[in-house]
Amino acid sequence: MSKQMDENYWRDKLTDEEFEVCREGGTEAPFSGEYWDVFDDGVYRCRCCGEVLFGSQSKFESGCGWPSFDAEHFEGAVKELPDSSYGMQRVEIRCSKCDAHLGHVFDDGPTDTGLRYCVNSLSVKLDQGSDETEDDTE
């Protein structure tokens, strides 16, 4: 699929705001997203492809204004890339299946993992009907 065909596909599938975050690496404003203060049971799926990325059992209140998780749901669900934008050294996280931008991961988490996956609500969708113990990957 060419880059233009890929862009057209995602523009048809996503809202303008979702496209900006997921496909262009944007960031929603803190405390504005749908899931920053939601702690319902379920799994968080990639907004673009539906892949399971995070489980509600790993979600915690970080005070940063974005949904925060201490671990990916299954090893390899997200991929990490160096990000030196805006003069900062960070680690970007993307969906391993469709390459959607999710947010960033930091090493200041409060649990045993020491990680804080800081995720844009626009890049995920809570699926309350899924069993968190199931590996939904193919």
Image (cartoon, helix red, strand yellow):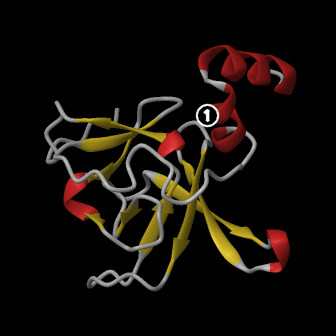
Circle 1 SS class: helix
- Label 1 is placed on what type of residue? Glu
Compared to residue 109, the image places residue 19 above or below, namely above
Q: Give the tally of numbered discs.
A: 1
Q: Residue at x 71, y 49 (%)?
A: 26
Q: Nearer the viewer, residue 21 or 43?
A: 21
Residue named by callout 1? 18
Residue 58, x across and y down, in percent: 26, 63
Dividing the image into 4 quarters, which one contains the N terminus? top right
Residue 67 horizontal/vertical position (percent): 41, 58
Q: Residues within 10 Å of mark 1 (few under 14, many from 20)?
A: many
At x 34%, y 70%, the residue is 70
Taking 37 as reference, is 100 above or below it?
above
Residue 126 location, quadrant: top left
Q: Going by the image, does 72 lie left or right of 48?
A: left
Q: Residue at x 16, y 30 (%)?
A: 129
- Look at 78% across and 24% down and name the residue there: 7
| Residue 61 picture location, percent across and down | 31, 69
> Which quadrant is home to the C terminus?
top left
Q: Is residue 95 above or below residue 47?
A: below
Is 86 rendered above or below residue 31?
A: below
Q: Position of residue 34 (x, y in %)?
A: 42, 43
Spot the residue most to the front. Answer: 32
Q: Which residue is nearer to you in this view: 45 or 118?
A: 118
The foreground one among 123 and 64 is: 64
